[in-house]
Image (cartoon, rainbow, N blue to C red):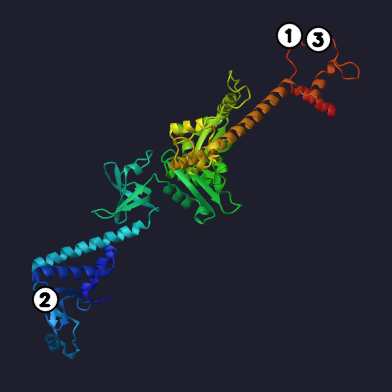
């Protein structure tokens, strides 16, 4: 390190401001050059150079050697140059003519001081922006310094950051001096310097807290596939394990819930659902609706990412959640639109669809069991064109889709451009109708299966098994044939009937 006092001062200032000494030296040179131009008021090409040995700033005018001078401020003749530098001077070279800085005076010095401060401040701001812009998504801890119109200003070491009102959890409140952990959401440039924006509601805060609390996430064994929050109320986190032996949900919960409880305390009691991620969207949606138990899930529209979920009647309110919160978070986490229905609601819906398909027809209408007359529907096609197609004998979108361009152009009112639009609409509509028919058929089969199971269960309750019935009538049987006496009298009124369990037990004793 140089013993030059000026150099030492520059290095100390650079260390204090967190910038490079070269930035300050460049600012000093720029300041002297600016002050010199104001003093000399000339068109000369003035330059300043900091002398590291003496700590002084040398000022000089740079001129180009030419054969014939046209601008004395920036040019010098070859003859004059050779008088100063001898035969080494050649046309095209640039030479320096020293200028005095002692004559600049107090005003020039003040101008130089302002330029130096401005350059140092700009460099300091640029360093802060570059540093924190690379740290977006990191969790920072700062102290509450003051409040500004609902926003909280935090002190992060030598810089200030703002926690806007919209990024604050409604379950939290702070006082000056409180320590707050928040995630860096953005760094904005402003006239007052870079503004660091923090957040307590961003899902990135939840992810970072899990990384700090769960070693398996920190070392990459367990991966967080997604996280969604409604700050202050509830959050859902999808996790996945890269090793079969590691349970991702158990690792995040911790022994007796210690790991997740520390995160819940940090978020002021926010409930956190940890679910296992799956490549299978059906399994993922089923897990995401936790703690509700799902009966079955079916994909309604793969392109639009729509699913239908059926739950038990008692689980419906739990699956939907308070004000729809559970299903809303599950939809955000999975990226699927979820339509939740109870078993009773689904059963009524299927029955209504079956009734529409099997309604006995009036005179001139389809009879019982016959499908209703097909109706031609073409989205985005004018009603007059659709009417013309119906008049031409087209009854379904599939029939229109199977037609050729030439055939369609024979229909009145359809030209080549309209025919292309009709074909595109008919193809899409035919595919949609096919998928809908398949879905209805699957639901009809499922409804019949459920109805058959319910009927079988009802018959079993009403009619006990034959062996059990024989055992129940053993007391009234005659001889060894096991037949019940024809004249056996029924149980007296008020006498409790024998339960189904008792005959079964006796039959078991007989078999034993």
- The percent coordinates of residue 175 (x first, y second) are 31, 43
Counting from the top left corner in percent of width and height, residue 397 is at: 53, 36
Q: Nearer the viewer, mark 1 or mark 3?
A: 3
Neighbourhood count class around disc 2 (C-alpha, 10 Å): few under 14, some 14–19, many 20 upward? some
> Which residue occupies the foreground of this view, 269 or 167?
167
Mark 3 vs mark 2: which is more N-terminal?
2
Quarter of the view holding residue 355: top right
Specify the quadrant that holds the C terminus.
Answer: top right
The quarter in which the N terminus is drawn is: bottom left
Q: CA distance from mark 1 to mark 2?
A: 131 Å
Say above or below: 81 vs 450: below
Q: Residue at x 9, y 70 (%)?
A: 41
Seen from the viewer's position, the closer of residues 10 and 327 is 327
Q: Residue 244, can we see it?
A: yes
- Residue topped by disc 3: 489
Disc 3/disc 2 C-alpha distance (Å): 137 Å
The image shows residue 156, relative to residue 369, as above or below, that is below
Q: Residues within 10 Å of mark 1 (few under 14, many from 20)?
A: few
Q: Which mark is residue 73?
A: 2
Q: Is residue 289 visible?
A: no
For residue 493, the mark is: 1
- Residue 382 image position (x, y, % from top left): 43, 34
Earlier-in-chain disc, 1 versus 2: 2
């Amino acid at each position: 390190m140089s013993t030059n006092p000026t150099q030492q001062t520059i290095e100390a200032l650079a260390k204090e401001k967190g910038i490079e000494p070269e930035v300050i030296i460049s600012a000093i040179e720029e300041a002297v050059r600016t002050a010199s131009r104001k003093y000399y008021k000339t068109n000369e090409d003035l330059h300043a150079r900091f002398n590291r040995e003496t700590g002084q700033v040398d000022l000089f005018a740079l001129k180009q050697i030419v054969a014939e001078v046209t601008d004395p401020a920036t040019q010098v003749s070859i003859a004059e140059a050779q008088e100063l530098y001898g035969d080494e001077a050649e046309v095209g070279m640039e030479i320096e003519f020293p200028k005095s800085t002692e004559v600049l005076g107090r005003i020039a010095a003040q101008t130089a001081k302002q330029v130096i401060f401005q350059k140092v401040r700009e460099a300091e701001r640029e360093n802060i922006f570059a540093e924190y812009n690379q740290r977006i998504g990191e969790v920072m801890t700062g102290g509450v310094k003051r409040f500004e119109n609902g926003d909280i200003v935090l002190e992060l070491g030598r810089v200030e950051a703002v926690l806007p009102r919209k990024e604050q959890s409604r379950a939290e409140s702070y006082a000056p001096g409180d320590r707050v952990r928040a995630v860096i959401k953005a760094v904005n440039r402003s006239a007052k310097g870079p503004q660091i924006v923090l957040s307590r509601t961003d899902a990135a805060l939840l992810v970072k807290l899990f990384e700090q609390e769960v070693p398996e996430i920190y070392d990459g064994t367990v991966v967080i596939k997604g996280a969604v929050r409604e700050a202050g109320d509830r959050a859902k986190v999808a996790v996945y394990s890269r090793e079969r032996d590691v349970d991702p949900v158990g690792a995040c919960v911790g022994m007796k819930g210690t790991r997740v409880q520390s995160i819940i305390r940090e978020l002021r009691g926010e409930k956190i659902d940890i679910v296992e991620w799956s490549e299978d969207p059906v399994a993922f949606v089923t897990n995401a609706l936790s703690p509700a138990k799902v009966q079955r899930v079916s994909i309604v529209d793969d392109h639009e990412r729509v699913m239908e979920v059926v739950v038990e009647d008692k689980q419906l309110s739990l699956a939907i959640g308070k004000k729809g919160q559970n299903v809303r978070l599950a939809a955000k986490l999975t990226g699927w639109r979820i339509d939740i229905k109870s078993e009773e609601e689904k059963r009524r819906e299927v029955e209504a669809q079956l009734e529409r398909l099997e309604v006995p027809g009036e005179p001139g209408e389809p009879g019982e069991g016959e499908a209703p007359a097909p109706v031609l529907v073409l989205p985005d096609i004018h009603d007059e064109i659709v009417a013309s197609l119906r008049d031409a004998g087209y009854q379904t979108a599939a029939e229109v889709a199977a037609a050729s361009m030439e055939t369609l152009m024979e229909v009145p009112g359809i030209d080549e451009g309209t025919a292309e639009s009709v074909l595109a609409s008919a193809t899409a509509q035919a595919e949609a109708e096919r998928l809908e028919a398949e879905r209805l058929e699957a639901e009809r089969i499922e409804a019949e299966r459920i109805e058959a199971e319910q009927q079988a269960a009802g018959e079993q309750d009403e009619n006990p098994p034959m062996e059990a019935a024989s055992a129940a009538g053993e007391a009234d049987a005659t001889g060894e044939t096991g037949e019940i006496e024809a004249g056996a009298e029924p149980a007296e009124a008020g006498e409790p009937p024998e339960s189904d369990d008792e005959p079964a037990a006796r039959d078991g004793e007989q078999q034993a």
